[in-house]
Amino acid sequence: MFDFVSFIPRAVVQGVPLLYGSTGETITEKSGNLNLGIPGVMYVGGISGVIGAFLYEQSTMGELNSFLAVAIPLAASLLGSLMMGLLYCLLTVTLRSNQNVTGLAMTTFGVGFGNFFGGSLIKLTGAEVPSIALSATSRVFSRALPFAEGWGWVGKVFFSYGFLAYLAVALALAASFVLQRTRVGLYLRAVGESPSTADSVGINVSGYKYFATCIGSMIAGLGGLYYVMDYACGVWSNDAFGDRGWLAIALVIFTLWRPNVGIFASILFGGLYILYLFIPTGTFLAFKELYKMLPYVVTIIVLVITSMRNRREDQSPAALGISYFREER
């Protein structure tokens, strides 16, 4: 029989980085900015946290302080992702460069940035394997709730995760509330739908684009930090993220730009991503490769169905990916 008690926690752990990335990208896209650099942002967020954790572990000779072991990598990750968001806004909002080209360039830059500094840290440690192990810091990040073990399968399914997993859910709910229930969210959606109209009523279009993109990048960067410190147990190795950044962008389309729906969709995507590990395929290894395609196939199906329904509330922001020139109002 299919072991759901083992499958669901692994699906959740696999889906949390996707939830961070999709929540950040949804906020960004609601402002009209299409940031295809999310994979690079997540990579930079991950390596920045690794650098912070590495420097802290090297500076202390005794037991790690739990607060500093969390605060330093977290602050480093947020700072690194913020810099990526500011760079994207400088190029696309201030200098009005093409958003698609800029996003793809930032993905390439982010991966190169992470590999360069990751390789440098590996050389500093003198490790025989091409990876860095930050196990002490990882134990703090992945520490489950204290009562999880005593609650049987309920504890394993719902309470056996590190604090970043619960933070991802909280941020998705908060983003949904802000976008739908607050004036800031209303202004942000107005900028994404019609920046010229928003500008005409006194809304600072550039300011909202900067704000949304930087906040979105910082949230997405936490997905990279979670992947390293929790999912990968504190082990950094170059080019280990795979296509999770692109899956996060696909998840935005799947959820129809709704962060709260992303909570369940990320678990679904995480489950589809690892389904091949739980379904016996015998000697037919080609079936495993077909199972790996499921997240992308599901996204395409949703995109086709959404296009056929042609409901405005299910479509992307009208000005998504279009640079705003105030002189053309």
Image (cartoon, grey):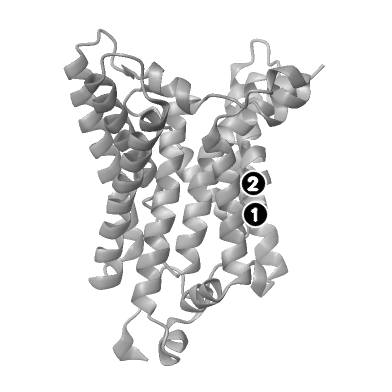
Q: Above or below — where is 49 with respect to 155?
A: below
Instruction: Determine whether 218 is above or below 27 in the image.
Output: above
Q: Quadrant of residue 179?
A: bottom right
The amino acid at mark 2 is Ile
- The amino acid type found where label 1 is placed reads Asn
> Looking at the picture, does residue 154 appear above or below residue 224?
above
Q: Quadrant of the C terminus?
A: bottom left
Which of the two residues, 165 or 268, is positioned nearer the viewer here?
A: 165
Q: Position of residue 174 (x, y in %)?
A: 58, 57
The quarter of the picture where residue 116 lies is: top left
> Measuring 58% from the left and 72% from the top, which residue is drawn there?
182
* Residue annotated with mark 2: 263
Give the number of marks: 2
User: Residue at the spot x=71%, y=27% of the render?
Assistant: 157
Relative to residue 239, is residue 138 drawn left or right? Answer: right
- Seen from the viewer's position, the closer of residues 52 and 235 is 52
How many C-alpha atoms fall within 10 Å of the one at disc 1: few (<14), some, or many (≥20)? Answer: many
The reply to whether callout 2 and callout 1 are in contact (CB within 8 Å) is yes
Question: Label 2, label 1: how many angstroms apart (C-alpha)?
Answer: 6 Å
Q: Is residue 317 left or right of residue 218?
A: right
Q: Residue furthest right?
A: 1
Q: Which residue is the extreme one toward the top?
A: 128
Residue 208: percent from left, percent from top: 40, 72
> Which residue sits at x=70%, y=31%?
158
Of residues 62 and 294, the one drawn nearer to the viewer in this rendering: 62
* Residue 86 placement: quadrant: bottom left
Q: Residue sitting at 42 percent across and 92 percent down?
A: 200
From this view, report whether residue 33 is shown above or below residue 148: below
- Residue 257 seen: no
**What residue is pinned by disc 1?**
260
Q: Is residue 284 left or right of residue 163?
A: right
